[in-house]
Amino acid sequence: MVMAVVLLAGQGYAQWPCTETVFTDVNNTTQPLFCGWIERFSTLGITGGCSQAPPLFCPENPVTRGQMAVFLSTAIEIKKPGKVAVVAKSGGDYDNPAAAMSDLASWCRPASDTTTPCLVKIMPGEYDIGSSSLQMQNAVDIEGSGVRVTRIVGTVDSNTSGLVRGAGAEIRDLTVENRGNHAASNAIAIYNDNSWFYIKNVSATAWGATNNHYGIYLTGNGITYMDNVSAFAGSGVNGYGIYSNAALVSMTNVDVYTNPSTNSYGLYFYTPDNWIPGIEMSRVNVVARGDMSGNTYSYGIYNRNFVITMKDVKATAWGGTVYNYGIFNTEAHYGGGRLTLIDVVTDVRDGSQSFGVFNTNTGGDVTIDHSVVKAVTNSVRNDNVSAKFYVGATKLDGVTTSGTIKCAGVHDANYNFYATSCP
């Protein structure tokens, strides 16, 4: 009787009321303190009693050491929720998240089932998965124990996969770090192709390759939702904090940083002429840094044919020896290449020329409101005379240039006000 109380209370269970319907020899009269505990002991499957017909518990019988071992192991095991695999440095179900994900049939669902939700829970520690990608599966989330305490690392060399490859699921509360191997051509931390993918409370870092680094690489017709995400690309020929090839994206609370590269892109959005995806981003901070030698270029945000709405976004670009762009917009087709900027800040410097917001001769319509656009050469520039380029209630810190630019209620760096014209 006491054993039932100790095992269940130790596992955090509360006492149930006594129903006197489980065992004929257990009731409120003879066991007023223990009846509820004993009945719950049975309903949880820890014991079947000492007799089935009639149902007896035999509360006064002694318990052998063997029986106690069974009680203990069963009580501990039932406390673990179903459809969860624990990855830990010791004491877990697996010591490698890739092993847990590839063994779904033993703990989650059969191979034919792609919809039953499951969870890979990763405890604190660093988990090196080597040179093969961790392929996520639909409806199987990966959850760490915190960005600073759970880290998945490896050295995957590929431009069509990442250290973690996404699926129709969520990855959260951890760091993913593709370290290259100092001979690899490409390093991608997180890759998603054609999936509805969620990234939350995650740091994605790629470094150690010789050519291309991608913090997060998105492609195909899927949608990726990011919330409280940081993306970092190391030094190389091309560095991309977040790269999207025709993939829809929603970003909230995102920080992006690229180390010095020949071509440095904080956010890079590219789509074919006949597909016009949309992007919503808010509370996003982007820093793109060129390597300040040779012929180098730096783009805070590069857009080709996407339709993008930015709210509370800061784009910083510097270190390129040739050109530095806060926001670069080009190649508008079939109504694409349109930008709406609200509460946006650009800070651009260095190079032979630097531009806050640059619309090429093929770019689409641009609207800027309640923003601060700062650059050395031109704060805003529109080379497409057919595009509508509107600026309202905005600080333009840098000379504007020719093109169809309409300003309303703007001021320059010295707070000279322009009611209907541009500085």
Image (spheres, rainbow, N blue to C red):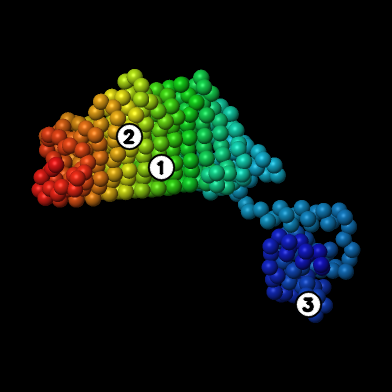
Mark 1–mark 3 CB contact (< 8 Å)? no
Q: Position of residue 53 (x, y in %)?
A: 81, 66
Check the image and report above or below for 76 versus 315. Answer: below
Instruction: Name the residue furthest front.
Output: 414
Where the C terminus falls, by quadrant?
A: top left
- Left or right side of 122 for 195: left
Q: Residue at x 62, y 52 (%)?
A: 82
Earlier-in-chain disc, 1 versus 3: 3
- Nearer the camera: disc 3 or disc 2: 2
Crowd tier of the residue under label 2, counting other residues whose Cα lies within 10 Å: few below 14, some 14–19, many 20 or above: many
Residue type, numbered disc 2: Ala
User: Of residues 415 and 186, which is closer to you in this image?
Assistant: 415
User: Of residues 40 and 122, which is closer to you in this image?
Assistant: 122
Spatial separation of the CA atoms under disc 1 and disc 2: 14 Å
Residue 160 visible, this angle: no
- Nearer the camera: disc 1 or disc 2: 2
User: Of residues 367 and 272, which is closer to you in this image?
Assistant: 367
Q: Which residue is identified by label 2?
A: 317
